[in-house]
Each structure stands twice: as structure tokens, then as C-alpha cells.
């Protein structure tokens, strides 16, 4: 019997060998060939007129070509956060604040030349008159007559010890009022001693420094 052959479509099942994903990533944008195994099921007749004797599978070898095309991004949008640093050598404050004035009061009288008893709490009342109060520091300092510092207090930051109680804004000036306590363990003496005091308004950043009031008092 003469076998006659004709062309026909045969359904085939293809199976790729396992390829690690890392290998595919390393071959990105390149052309490669993957060998695959195909299997044809011979249990069905190729056509109505012709058939192949027997049944089973016919393994064949096929090749699949994978081609990757690179893409170039020519334009993209992104956000860039910039950090700028400025060195300020000189800072001018306008309008220039007028020279402030101040008072230090103890028991309703100016502190100047008063006598303070050692070992007691003395509450000093300060009063500042000026055009610029906000952002300004207050410093209260007491020194012995030989220049050594005995007491130092500030309104803001360290060491503190000055307490603002009110701030009044008038058309022509601002008035700041508060308390500066001298505690029991400060300015303790065995015998009568004279001290120098000063109240200063300052702003180091603006290079401003004003002596509001100064003088002497005695501790006995």
C-alpha cells in the first residue's frame, strides 16, 4: 500500500524549560533563542482521507526567539527639593528702634541706693519703654565692686529668672512690665556690701544692645 501524505494542521502542546527570572533580567534588551520541546498527539487522524498507523506522542524540537526592544525616555518630569543657605554679614533693621528706657523698682521706690537685707526674697519690678519689645532679650546683672559677677538672669532661654507680666502697645511706644526676684540664697553676705546692677535690652542677631538702667544698692 502506497502511503499518501497531505498537509494538515495538527494541534501541538509546547513546553518551555524553566529559566530563572534573574537570567532573563541579565539578558534584557538582547535577542536570545530558547529551545522548547513540542509534543504532537497522534491519536487523531490528520485528515479524513489519510491516517497514521499507531498512537502515542511524537516529540520534536522547536526554537522560540525572544526579542526585546529598548526604549529611551527622552523627556520626564520630576520634583527637585532645593536647600539654600545664606550667610548674612550685615542686617539692617528699619525703622531703627529708638533708645529704650527702663526702671527697676523695689517696694514702690527705685532700686538705686536702696538697702536689701541678706537672706530674704526681694521682688524687683521692671518697666521698659521702647518702640521694639518683641524679639528683644532682657538681661539683669549684679556685680560686686571688684567686677565679679554675682547674679545673672534673662527673660528668654538660659538661665531665665525674669518674668514678663504685661505688654502694652501705645501709639508712640510699647510698655513691658514684669518681675525679677532675688532669691534667699543669692547675694548672701556676712557684712554690709555694695553691689553694682544693670538692666539691659539686647538682640545679638540684630546687633542691638541698650542699657536701660544701672546703679548700686547695698546688702546688709
Image (spheres, grey):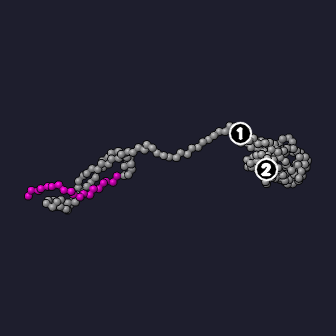
In this rendering, position of residue 37 left or right of residue 4: right
Q: Along the line of sight, which residue is nearer the eye, 152 or 125?
A: 125
Q: Which residues are magenta?
A: 1-19
In this rendering, position of residue 73 left or right of residue 107: left
Q: Along the line of sight, which residue is nearer the eye, 64 or 136?
A: 136
Determine if residue 190 is in view. no
Determine if residue 31 is in view. yes
Q: Residue sitting at 83 percent across and 42 percent down?
A: 148
Q: Secondary structure at mark 1?
A: loop
**Residue 2 got which mark?**
none
Residue lying at the far front of the rendered structure: 171
Coordinates of residue 182 in the picture (x, y in percent)? 83, 52
Residue lying at the far top of the rendered structure: 89
Q: Is residue 18 magenta?
A: yes
Q: Along the line of sight, which residue is nearer the eye, 77 or 19?
A: 77
Circle 2 residue: 170
Q: Is residue 138 magenta?
A: no
Query: Which image quadrant: the N terminus?
Result: bottom left
Q: Secondary structure at mark 2?
A: loop
Q: Residue sitting at 21 percent across and 56 percent down?
A: 9
Coordinates of residue 76 in the picture (x, y in percent)? 46, 45
Magenta region's main secondary structure?
Answer: loop
Circle 1 residue: 92
Q: Along the line of sight, which residue is nearer the eye, 94 or 118?
A: 94
Q: Residue sitting at 29 percent across and 50 percent down?
A: 64
Mark in the foreground, 2 or 1? 2
Q: CA distance from mark 2 to mark 1?
A: 25 Å
Q: Residue sitting at 31 percent across and 53 percent down?
A: 17
> How many C-alpha atoms fall within 10 Å of the one at disc 2: few (<14), some, or many (≥20)?
few
Residue lying at the far left of the rendered structure: 1
Amino acid at each position: 500500500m502506497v502511503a499518501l501524505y497531505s498537509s494538515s494542521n495538527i494541534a501541538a502542546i509546547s513546553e518551555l524549560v524553566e529559566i530563572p527570572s534573574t537570567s532573563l533580567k541579565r539578558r534584557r534588551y538582547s535577542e536570545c533563542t530558547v529551545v522548547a520541546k513540542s509534543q504532537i498527539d497522534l491519536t487523531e487522524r490528520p485528515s479524513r482521507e489519510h491516517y497514521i498507523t499507531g498512537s502515542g506522542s511524537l516529540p520534536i524540537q522547536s526554537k522560540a526567539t525572544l526579542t526585546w526592544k529598548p526604549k529611551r525616555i527622552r523627556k520626564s518630569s520630576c520634583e527637585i527639593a532645593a536647600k539654600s543657605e545664606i550667610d548674612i554679614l550685615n542686617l539692617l533693621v528699619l525703622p531703627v528702634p529708638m533708645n529704650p528706657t527702663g526702671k527697676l523698682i523695689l517696694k514702690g521706690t527705685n532700686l538705686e541706693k536702696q538697702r536689701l537685707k541678706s537672706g530674704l526674697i526681694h521682688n524687683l519690678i521692671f518697666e521698659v519703654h521702647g518702640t521694639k519689645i518683641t524679639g528683644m532679650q532682657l538681661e539683669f546683672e549684679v556685680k560686686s565692686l571688684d567686677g565679679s559677677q554675682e547674679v545673672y538672669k534673662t527673660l528668654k532661654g538660659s538661665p531665665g529668672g525674669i518674668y514678663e507680666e504685661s505688654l502694652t502697645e501705645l501709639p508712640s511706644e510699647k510698655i513691658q512690665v514684669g518681675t525679677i526676684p532675688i532669691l534667699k540664697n543669692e547675694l548672701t553676705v556676712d557684712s554690709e556690701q555694695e553691689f553694682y546692677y544693670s538692666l539691659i535690652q539686647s538682640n545679638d542677631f540684630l546687633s542691638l544692645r541698650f542699657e536701660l538702667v544701672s546703679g548700686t544698692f547695698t546688702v546688709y
